[in-house]
Amino acid sequence: EPEVTQTPSHQVTQMGQEVILRCVPISNHLYFYWYRQILGQKVEFLVSFYNNEISEKSEIFDDQFSVERPDGSNFTLKIRSTKLEDSAMYFCASRDYNEQFFGPGTRLTVL
Amino acid sequence: AQTVTQSQPEMSVQEAETVTLSCTYDTSESDYYLFWYKQPPSRQMILVIRQEAYKQQNATENRFSVNFQKAAKSFSLKISDSQLGDAAMYFCAYRRDYGSSNTGKLIFGQGTTLQVKP
């Protein structure tokens, strides 16, 4: 069964460093998403992506964040200069018409 | 703006018993979808059940069923014959129906941690 994959599973970085989180969506899906979950809190929408451009972004998704689909298969989330409060679980999702399928998540720890 | 509220931070149930998790939501839309996701300790998000707002019949998936009350904007999840593997955090989620301006993003509640006692 096709699935969304994410790498790495855990990323530790120093405050102020850039990180890139990678996702491989399900191959025939056209819509892609990033969500964030701070430990013990709810899952929050960050950004949606369709047709090689951002279709919607939340207030959390400020200028420090960017997304890209560089090669037609990967979907990346970049955080330019990480802050302590960026520590969270980051989920990628892709969707067919009916539902979104989530990846296993990347745990980002900012020290 | 749409909101989703889960008022039960934690629930517990005895193995083989039935438990109901509550969810309410607020929206001015008439067409939308509601979901329950399970998040076990691995933190993977797993879809449990989906309900289309235009359907009056409550969705059922094996031991999982919902009580969808559209007028009351209530969407509870019933787990029958609870098993140890059901222990997880459960999130209620909402999305608008797809349209030219709707990207299909999910709006989640705060989650309910379910403990299953042997």
Image (cartoon, rainbow, N blue to C red):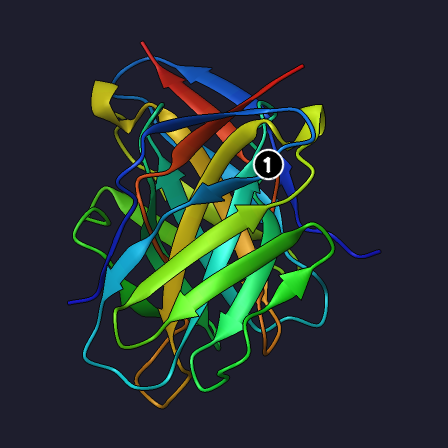
Which residue is pictured at 39% across the width and 17% down the height?
A: A109
Q: Secondary structure at mark 1?
A: loop
Which x, y percent locates residue B65? 59, 58
Front one among A103 and A74: A103
Quarter residue B17 falls in = top right
Report the label total: 1
Task: Give, as a three-letter code, the residue at label 1.
Answer: Gln
Q: Is residue A84 left or right of residue A105?
A: left
When the figure is inspected, residue A27 is found, relative to residue B71, above or below; the finding is above
Which residue is pictured at 32% across the width and 51% down the height?
A: A46
Which x, y percent locates residue A7? 61, 34
Which residue is pictured at 26% across the width and 61% down the height?
A: B25
Which residue is pictured at 57% across the width and 22% down the height?
A: B41
Task: Give the residue at the far top of this rendering.
Answer: A111
Q: Is residue A32 left or right of residue A13?
A: right
Q: Which quadrant holds the C terminus of chain B?
A: top right
Which x, y percent locates residue B63? 70, 50
Q: Which quadrant holds the N terminus of chain B?
A: bottom left
Q: Tell me the residue that label 1 is attached to.
A: B44
Task: Give the residue at the far right of this rendering.
Answer: A1
Front one among B68 and A89: B68
When the figure is inspected, residue B88 is found, relative to residue A97, above or below; the finding is above
Q: Is residue A34 left or right of residue B117?
A: left
Q: Is residue A70 visible?
A: no
Q: Residues within 10 Å of mark 1 (few under 14, many from 20)?
A: some
